[in-house]
Image (spheres, grey):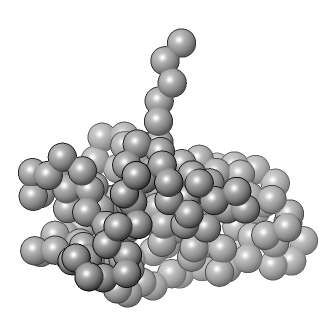
Amino acid sequence: MEVTLAVQERHAPHSVCYGCGPANPDGLHLRSFEVGEELVADWQPTAGLEAFAGALNGGICGLVLDCHANWAAALGLMRSSGADRPPATVTARYEVQLLRPTPTDRPLRLRARVVSIEGHRAVADAEIVVGHEVTATFRGTFVAVAPGHPAYHRWDP
Protein backbone atom coordinates (compact mmCIF):
# COMPACT_ATOMS: atom_id res chain seq x y z
CA MET A 1 0.00 0.00 0.00
CA GLU A 2 1.49 3.34 -1.08
CA VAL A 3 1.23 6.25 1.35
CA THR A 4 1.31 9.69 -0.23
CA LEU A 5 2.64 12.51 1.91
CA ALA A 6 1.03 15.92 1.75
CA VAL A 7 3.30 18.80 0.73
CA GLN A 8 3.31 19.97 4.36
CA GLU A 9 4.49 16.55 5.58
CA ARG A 10 7.13 16.32 2.83
CA HIS A 11 8.58 19.81 3.11
CA ALA A 12 7.77 20.97 6.66
CA PRO A 13 7.03 18.01 8.94
CA HIS A 14 7.96 20.04 12.05
CA SER A 15 5.82 23.07 11.18
CA VAL A 16 3.57 24.31 13.97
CA CYS A 17 1.36 26.48 11.74
CA TYR A 18 -2.17 26.37 13.15
CA GLY A 19 -3.77 25.79 9.75
CA CYS A 20 -1.41 23.35 8.06
CA GLY A 21 1.38 22.39 10.44
CA PRO A 22 1.74 18.63 10.86
CA ALA A 23 3.44 19.16 14.25
CA ASN A 24 0.72 21.33 15.83
CA PRO A 25 -1.37 19.02 18.05
CA ASP A 26 -4.16 21.61 18.29
CA GLY A 27 -4.06 22.68 14.63
CA LEU A 28 -6.38 22.06 11.69
CA HIS A 29 -3.91 19.77 9.86
CA LEU A 30 -4.72 20.86 6.34
CA ARG A 31 -3.09 18.42 3.88
CA SER A 32 -2.39 19.69 0.36
CA PHE A 33 -1.51 17.61 -2.71
CA GLU A 34 -0.20 18.55 -6.15
CA VAL A 35 -2.65 17.63 -8.90
CA GLY A 36 -1.36 18.86 -12.24
CA GLU A 37 -0.95 22.64 -12.05
CA GLU A 38 -3.15 22.91 -8.95
CA LEU A 39 -2.74 22.26 -5.27
CA VAL A 40 -5.78 20.44 -3.87
CA ALA A 41 -6.88 19.65 -0.32
CA ASP A 42 -9.97 17.96 1.04
CA TRP A 43 -10.73 19.06 4.58
CA GLN A 44 -13.59 18.39 6.98
CA PRO A 45 -14.37 21.30 9.33
CA THR A 46 -15.85 20.69 12.75
CA ALA A 47 -18.80 22.32 14.48
CA GLY A 48 -16.40 24.06 16.88
CA LEU A 49 -15.26 26.26 13.98
CA GLU A 50 -18.72 27.54 13.11
CA ALA A 51 -19.84 31.17 13.01
CA PHE A 52 -23.43 29.99 13.36
CA ALA A 53 -25.10 26.59 13.18
CA GLY A 54 -23.88 24.72 10.12
CA ALA A 55 -21.66 27.50 8.69
CA LEU A 56 -17.87 27.78 8.92
CA ASN A 57 -16.52 30.98 10.45
CA GLY A 58 -15.33 33.40 7.76
CA GLY A 59 -11.99 33.87 9.49
CA ILE A 60 -11.38 30.13 9.35
CA CYS A 61 -12.23 30.19 5.63
CA GLY A 62 -9.52 32.84 5.21
CA LEU A 63 -7.06 30.88 7.35
CA VAL A 64 -7.29 27.63 5.39
CA LEU A 65 -7.24 29.44 2.04
CA ASP A 66 -4.18 31.43 3.15
CA CYS A 67 -2.28 28.30 4.21
CA HIS A 68 -3.24 26.38 1.09
CA ALA A 69 -2.39 29.22 -1.32
CA ASN A 70 0.87 29.89 0.53
CA TRP A 71 1.98 26.34 -0.24
CA ALA A 72 0.98 26.73 -3.88
CA ALA A 73 3.09 29.90 -4.02
CA ALA A 74 6.08 28.28 -2.26
CA LEU A 75 6.02 25.33 -4.66
CA GLY A 76 5.72 27.69 -7.63
CA LEU A 77 8.72 29.70 -6.42
CA MET A 78 10.67 26.47 -5.92
CA ARG A 79 9.95 25.33 -9.48
CA SER A 80 10.69 28.73 -11.02
CA SER A 81 14.09 28.95 -9.29
CA GLY A 82 15.06 25.32 -9.86
CA ALA A 83 15.50 24.74 -6.12
CA ASP A 84 15.10 21.29 -4.59
CA ARG A 85 12.88 22.51 -1.76
CA PRO A 86 10.40 25.36 -1.39
CA PRO A 87 11.53 28.62 0.16
CA ALA A 88 9.97 29.73 3.44
CA THR A 89 7.23 32.10 2.39
CA VAL A 90 5.01 34.52 4.26
CA THR A 91 1.79 36.24 3.35
CA ALA A 92 2.21 39.85 2.27
CA ARG A 93 -1.41 40.48 1.35
CA TYR A 94 -4.65 38.63 0.78
CA GLU A 95 -8.29 39.16 -0.02
CA VAL A 96 -11.12 36.73 0.63
CA GLN A 97 -14.58 36.93 -0.85
CA LEU A 98 -17.17 34.96 1.07
CA LEU A 99 -19.77 34.18 -1.59
CA ARG A 100 -22.15 32.03 0.46
CA PRO A 101 -22.09 30.17 3.78
CA THR A 102 -19.53 27.37 3.81
CA PRO A 103 -21.15 24.30 5.38
CA THR A 104 -19.47 22.28 8.10
CA ASP A 105 -21.45 19.06 7.57
CA ARG A 106 -19.49 17.83 4.55
CA PRO A 107 -15.92 17.93 3.25
CA LEU A 108 -14.56 21.05 1.62
CA ARG A 109 -12.29 21.00 -1.40
CA LEU A 110 -9.63 23.70 -1.51
CA ARG A 111 -8.03 24.46 -4.86
CA ALA A 112 -5.08 26.82 -5.41
CA ARG A 113 -2.91 27.82 -8.34
CA VAL A 114 -0.12 30.30 -8.93
CA VAL A 115 -1.12 33.11 -11.28
CA SER A 116 2.18 35.02 -11.38
CA ILE A 117 5.75 34.92 -10.14
CA GLU A 118 8.07 37.89 -10.08
CA GLY A 119 11.42 37.42 -8.39
CA HIS A 120 10.80 36.24 -4.83
CA ARG A 121 7.05 37.09 -4.91
CA ALA A 122 4.19 34.89 -6.06
CA VAL A 123 0.48 35.59 -6.44
CA ALA A 124 -1.90 32.68 -5.97
CA ASP A 125 -5.65 32.26 -6.34
CA ALA A 126 -7.62 29.76 -4.30
CA GLU A 127 -11.19 28.75 -3.63
CA ILE A 128 -13.35 26.60 -1.40
CA VAL A 129 -15.67 24.29 -3.29
CA VAL A 130 -18.46 22.30 -1.66
CA GLY A 131 -20.15 19.88 -4.02
CA HIS A 132 -20.29 21.95 -7.19
CA GLU A 133 -20.56 25.37 -5.51
CA VAL A 134 -17.74 27.80 -4.82
CA THR A 135 -18.34 29.27 -1.36
CA ALA A 136 -15.24 31.48 -1.06
CA THR A 137 -12.49 32.86 -3.30
CA PHE A 138 -9.04 34.13 -2.39
CA ARG A 139 -6.11 35.99 -3.92
CA GLY A 140 -2.86 36.32 -2.03
CA THR A 141 0.64 37.67 -2.50
CA PHE A 142 3.40 35.62 -0.87
CA VAL A 143 7.06 36.49 -0.41
CA ALA A 144 10.05 34.19 0.04
CA VAL A 145 11.86 35.46 3.12
CA ALA A 146 15.60 35.96 3.45
CA PRO A 147 17.98 34.93 6.24
CA GLY A 148 17.37 37.06 9.31
CA HIS A 149 13.58 37.04 8.91
CA PRO A 150 11.86 35.31 11.88
CA ALA A 151 10.13 32.84 9.52
CA TYR A 152 13.26 31.91 7.56
CA HIS A 153 13.82 28.57 9.34
CA ARG A 154 10.19 27.71 10.04
CA TRP A 155 10.14 24.70 7.71
CA ASP A 156 13.57 23.35 8.63
CA PRO A 157 13.78 19.91 10.26
Residue at the image position 57 percent from the left and 73 percent from the top? 63
Where residue 136 appears, x then y in whole percent? Answer: 56, 71
Between 154 and 85, the residue placed more toward the observer is 154
Q: Quadrant of residue 101?
A: bottom right
Picture layout, residue 50 above or below residue 148: above
For the N terminus, the quadrant is top right
Between 155 and 89, the residue placed more toward the observer is 155
Residue at the image position 49 percent from the left and 18 percent from the top? 2
Between 28 and 52, the residue placed more toward the observer is 28
- Give the left or right position of residue 141, taking residue 82 as reference: right
Picture layout, residue 62 above or below residue 43: below
Between 53 and 156, the residue placed more toward the observer is 156
Residue 135 seen by the camera: no
Q: Quadrant of residue 119?
A: bottom left
Where residue 31 appears, x then y in whole percent? Answer: 54, 48
Disc count in the image?
0
Q: In the current view of this chain or complex, which residue is farthest to the top?
A: 1
Residue 155 seen by the camera: yes
- Give the left or right position of residue 2, taking residue 11 as reference: right
Picture layout, residue 48 above or below residue 148: above
Residue at the image position 48 percent from the left and 49 percent from the top? 13
Residue at the image position 9 percent from the left and 51 percent from the top? 82
- Give the left or right position of residue 9, taking residue 70 as reference: right
Where residue 36 appears, x then y in whole percent? Answer: 30, 40
Picture layout, residue 11 above or below residue 153: above
Where residue 88 appears, x then y in whole percent? Answer: 31, 67
